[in-house]
Amino acid sequence: MDEERYNSPILIVDDDAALLQALPQVVDLRMKNVHVETCDSANHALELIKENDYDAIVSDVKMPGMDGIELLSHVHEIRPDTPVLLITGHGDHGLAIQAIRGGAYDYILKPIDRDTFVAALQRAIQTRQLSRKVVEQQLALSLHAKSLGRLVEKRTHELVVANATKDKFLTIVSHELRSPLTNLKGMTQLMRRQLEKGDAVNAVHQGLVDMERSISRTEVLVQDLLDTSLMETNLFELNRHPCDLVELCRNLLSDYTRRSILQLNCELLGDPIEVDIDRERISQVVINLLSNARKYSTRGTPITITLQQSGYEVILSVRDVGVGIPQEELPHIFEQFYRVPGIEVQTGNRSGLGLGLFIARKIVERHGGHIEVQSAPGQGSNFSVILPRYIDPTRTNETEIQPITHTQAVWTITH
C-alpha cells in the first residue's frame, strides 16, 4: 500500500475493556499512520460516526443495547462507503452470515488472531481509500467533461461567428470592389468609343479623372483590408515620436481642404500640445473621422475640429451636424464590418466596408487612448479621440507638469 495515502482514522467499538485496550496496541505495532479511536457502546459510536469520517469501523456484534448488526445498518445510512468489520464469537456462524448479508465488509472470529485482524483491517482501509480515489477521479472527470463541453460550445460559437463574419466580409468586399472596377471598365469603354469618333481630348481628360477617383477608392479599400489583417495577426506596428499635435492638425487640415477644395477657418490656434504618436497613423484616424463627417452631413454645413488639453489627456474632437446615429447603434459602430442600417438611404452615400472606425479605434488603443462618441438622430455626431499627453522625462520641476485644462485649437471646415 502507498504509505503516503495510508493516513487513516479508524473506530473500534466494543464493550469489552480488555479488547478496547489490546486492539489499538496491535494496530500501533503492525500498521503505520493509522489513528485509532475507541468507544464502548454503539450509541456513542453513532455520535462519533456522524461527526467523523472513518476509513474503517470495527465493532463487536454482541453489545448491551444496540448490537453490532443494528449499528451496521445505521452506518450504511450515514456513511454508505465506510467498510465495517464485525467481531463474532467462535461458532456464531449464523451471526457471521447475518453480518455479511447486512453489508459488513468482513467478520473476525474470537479469539482474535492478530495477523488475521491486521490483514482484514488493511484490506478494508485500502478498499475505502481506493473507492474514494475512484470517486474523486470520477468527479474530476465529470468537471473536466463539463469544462470541455463549455470549451467546445465556446469554440463552436466562435466558429459560427467567424464564418458569419467571413461571409459578411466576402459579400461586402466583393460589392465594394466591384463598383470601382465597374467604373474603370466603363470609363475605358467610353474613352475607346470617343477615340474612335475622333473626339479624344475631352473624353480622355474626364475619363482619366474618373479613373483616378476609382483607383483611389480601390486603394483605400485595399489599405483598410491590409490594416485589418495586420491588426488581427498582431503585426501592426507604430513608429512613435513626440510631436506637436496642434501643428500636425494644422498641416493636415490645410492639405486636406486644399485637395478636397473645401473652406477652412482657423478660429483659435494656441500653444503646442505634445503627444507621443505615430504621425501617419493618427493622421489616418483624423482623415477617417473627417471623411465620415462629410459623408453623413449636408453640403454647406460646418465640421468643427477641436483640440483640448484636459489634465494629463489630449482630446481631439470632430463634430458635425449631420444625420446622427441612433442610440441603439452606438455600441456597435466600432465593430469590424459594421455599417449603420439605413444610413445610406438617408444620405445617398455609400458606407464602405465598415472598417474605418474599427481601424481608428485599434490605432488609438495602440497609443494607449480611446475613442468616444456622442450622437443622436438629426443632431449630428461628435467623435472624440483621447490620447495621453506626452511629458518630457527631462523636466523635473513639478509646476511644469501640473494637470491643466483648456482649449488649444479650433478649426471649422465648410464642405
Image: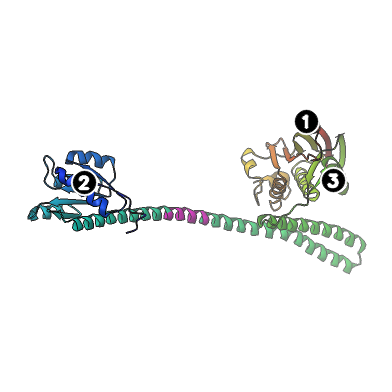
Q: Which residues are magenta?
A: 144-155
In terms of depth relative to the viewer, which is nearer, 67 or 297? 67
Mark 1 surroundings: few (<14), some (14-19) or many (≥20) residues within 10 A: few
Along the viewing direction, whichever of 357 and 24 lies nearer the viewer:
24
Tell me where residue 172 appears, x and y as whole percent. Answer: 67, 56
- Name the element at disc 2: strand
Callout 3: few (<14), some (14-19), or many (20+) C-alpha neighbours within 10 Å?
Answer: some
Mark 1 secondary-structure assignment: strand
Give the residue type at disc 3: Leu
Q: First in sequence: mark 2 or mark 1?
A: 2
Placement of 201 over or under 292, stated as above or below: below
Residue 157 placement, left or right of 282? left
Residue 311 is situated, as x and y percent measured from the top left of the image, at 75, 33
Q: Residue at x 34, y 58 (%)?
A: 2
Residue 152 among magenta residues: yes
Instruction: Look at mark 3 in the image and give the residue it sits on.
Output: 252
Is residue 360 in view from this perspective?
A: yes
**Magenta stretch, overall SS:** helix
Q: Nearer the viewer, mark 1 or mark 3?
A: 1
> Image quadrant of residue 346?
top right
Q: Amino acid at mark 2?
A: Ile
Comes first in the chain, label 1 or label 3: 3
Question: What is the quadrant of residue 320 in the picture?
Answer: top right
Q: Position of residue 180 (x, y in %)?
A: 76, 59
Q: Which mark is residue 404?
A: 1
Whichever of callouts 2 and 3 sits on the residue coming sooner in the sequence is: 2
Residue type marked 1: Ile
Q: Nearer the viewer, mark 2 or mark 3?
A: 2
- The answer to whether marks 2 and 3 mark residues whose Cβ atoms lie closer than 8 Å is no
The residue that mark 2 highlights is 12
Label count reads: 3
